């Protein structure tokens, strides 16, 4: 028991502690492995998305797809208003409390989000559509926004239900709904709508509504045990601690959502619709690297919330470093592929899209760096300091907007990539400093540095071989990618064998 309590302050609730630290670390590792296994399915589904979106862009054209991307960004901002921060609040709350308390808070939150999303949807379908379209500099997006407002209620409830499941460490529902059903149904409906004659933005807006409605139906089926009580009772008031956390999380998520999508609005204002469409494709392809790191968010959030309730430094370092090293090791092969083949991949979207090649590669390098630092934000929120996150994301958003207005007119897509990636790296740096303060330690061990070094070595190998070969561009890229992946795989396998050997020796010694 002493090994578990070594990092606990006086007065910690010892009755809730497990019997040994080894048992706790094993539970965290198993939860992470289950999450990674589920995410593997998500990665396969994510790999199907770019080809589908290639078909959508080719069907509707870069201009229509660019306008839809801007309207979609505005819809996600409206979502942040609709969910009131309760998705992040429940993800944190459910991981810390017993099943009965989680169920009561979840049902009350559903009522709040249903009411807020109905009001928001009515506003977007009414007078806000004109104002939002004018603010984004896209008057053609107004009718599209009015139609997409029908999808705000199912979109908001889906987000909340997925957060509840993730707080219970049920990653499979998120993978099935958000990574699979949502993008695949959206692309499928858009292509069907185009085939029957809705060849303008109405087809894309209809696909948005249908896909989010189907996702809500799936979530309701997956969460029916949570939603159907044994006996009917009026929803109870939300717990005070949850309200306090959610209040700060709401502001942070609203500003964060603005930060994630303000690039589309600014690029729309500073460039033409075709350039906006190319930038949307750049983000779609570049997000293949970013989505790997973000797929770990719900897994580590639930774990860090438990650690924050009973502060344990050793557990934090082990769990954080394990997750971060996995993120870097999973990101590296995808990053290498895009460094080698970004130009032909973008060329699939249509003529002129290859102009975004440099922007994709730069963006992916920023996302790789965020893989090293990005999980620190969940240490901060897991320890209950959601108020700090609002300050951080506000500073990063201001930096991004300023950089976009300075860099996009001068450097175009490359400037947009630098502004977006640089501001996100600033945010991760702020989170890292605050995680060190709130946890009292840097949560990194040697596994992280080995994963980072291996990734950098593989990238250097690819660039050196690609630059030294004189064959055709595609053949040169293929040879460089194959060599870099062979090196990456061999070194990673050696590291795993050495780690397993060390573990066996430790067991024998014990």
Image (cartoon, rainbow, N blue to C red):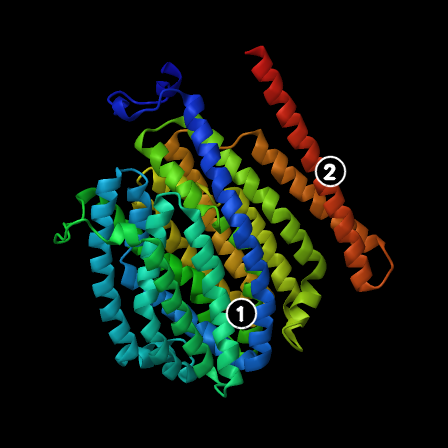
Q: Image point 33% across, 22% down: which residue? A: 8
Residue 164, percent across and down? 32, 49
**Residue 79: quarter of image:** bottom left
Q: Quadrant of the N terminus?
A: top left
Count neighbours of disc 2 (C-alpha within 10 A) and say few if under 14, some if 14 to 19, many if 20 or more: few
Count neighbours of disc 1 (C-alpha within 10 A) and say few if under 14, some if 14 to 19, many if 20 or more: many
Residue 407, percent across and down? 54, 66
Query: Eyeballing the image, is 150 above or below 36?
Result: below
Left-right relation of 357 to 8: right
N-terminal of the two: label 2 or label 1? 1
Asked whether the viewer can see residue 411, the reply is no
Residue 228, percent across and down? 23, 53
Say which residue label 2 marks. 490
User: Which residue occupies the extreme front position in the image?
Assistant: 230
Q: Image point 52% across, 35% down: which residue? A: 322
Depth check, front residue: 479 or 463: 479
Whether the residues at callouts 2 and 1 have beta carbons within 8 Å, the answer is no
Query: Eyeballing the image, is 282 above or below 91?
Result: below
Q: How far apart are the two marked residues, 2 and 1, measured between alpha carbons?
A: 36 Å
Residue 120, percent across and down? 26, 70
Q: Nearer the viewer, mark 2 or mark 1?
A: 2
Say which residue label 1 marks. 280
């Amino acid at each position: 028991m002493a090994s578990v309590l070594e990092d606990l302050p006086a007065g910690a609730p010892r009755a809730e502690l497990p019997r040994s630290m080894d048992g706790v670390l094993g539970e965290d590792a198993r939860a992470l492995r289950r999450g990674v296994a589920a995410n593997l399915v998500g990665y396969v589904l994510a790999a199907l998305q770019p080809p589908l979106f290639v078909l959508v862009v080719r069907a509707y054209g870069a201009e229509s797809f660019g306008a839809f991307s801007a309207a979609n960004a505005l819809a996600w901002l409206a979502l942040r208003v609709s969910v009131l921060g309760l998705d992040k609040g429940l993800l944190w709350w459910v991981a810390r409390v017993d099943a009965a308390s989680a169920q009561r808070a979840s049902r009350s939150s559903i009522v709040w989000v249903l009411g807020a999303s109905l009001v928001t949807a009515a506003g977007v379908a009414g007078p806000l559509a004109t104002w939002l379209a004018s603010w984004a500099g896209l008057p053609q997006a107004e009718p599209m926004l009015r139609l997409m407002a029908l999808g705000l209620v199912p979109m908001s409830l889906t987000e909340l239900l997925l957060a509840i499941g993730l707080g219970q460490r049920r990653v499979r529902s998120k993978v099935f709904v958000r990574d699979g059903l949502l993008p695949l149904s959206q692309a499928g409906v858009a292509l069907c709508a185009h085939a029957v004659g809705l060849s303008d933005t109405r087809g894309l807006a209809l696909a948005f509504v249908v896909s989010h409605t189907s996702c809500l139906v799936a979530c309701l089926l997956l969460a029916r045990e949570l939603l159907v009580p044994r006996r009917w009772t009026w929803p109870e008031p939300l717990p005070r601690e949850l309200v306090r956390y959610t209040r700060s999380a709401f502001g942070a998520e609203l500003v964060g959502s603005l930060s994630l999508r303000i690039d589309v609005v600014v690029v729309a204002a500073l460039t033409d619709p075709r350039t906006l469409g190319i930038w949307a494709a750049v983000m779609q392809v570049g997000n293949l690297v970013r989505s790997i790191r973000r797929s770990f968010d719900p897994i580590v959030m639930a774990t860090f919330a438990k650690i924050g309730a009973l502060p344990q430094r050793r557990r934090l370092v082990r769990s954080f470093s394990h997750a971060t090293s996995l993120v870097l090791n999973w990101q590296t092969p995808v990053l290498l592929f895009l460094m080698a083949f970004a130009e032909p991949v973008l060329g699939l979207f249509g003529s002129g899209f290859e102009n975004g090649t440099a922007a994709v590669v730069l963006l992916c390098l920023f996302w790789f760096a965020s893989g090293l630092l990005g999980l620190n934000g969940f240490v901060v929120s897991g320890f209950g300091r959601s108020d700090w996150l609002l300050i951080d994301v506000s500073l990063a958003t201001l930096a991004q907007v300023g950089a976009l207005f300075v860099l996009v007119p001068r450097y175009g897509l490359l400037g947009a990539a630098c502004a977006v990636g640089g501001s996100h790296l600033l945010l991760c740096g702020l989170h890292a400093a605050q995680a060190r303060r709130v946890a009292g330690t840097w949560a990194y061990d040697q596994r992280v540095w080995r994963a980072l070094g291996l990734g950098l070595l593989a990238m250097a190998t690819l660039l050196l071989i690609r630059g030294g070969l004189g064959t055709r561009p595609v053949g040169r890229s293929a040879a460089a990618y194959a060599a870099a992946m062979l090196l990456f795989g061999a070194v990673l396998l050696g590291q795993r064998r050495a780690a397993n050997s060390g573990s066996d020796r430790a067991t024998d010694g014990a």
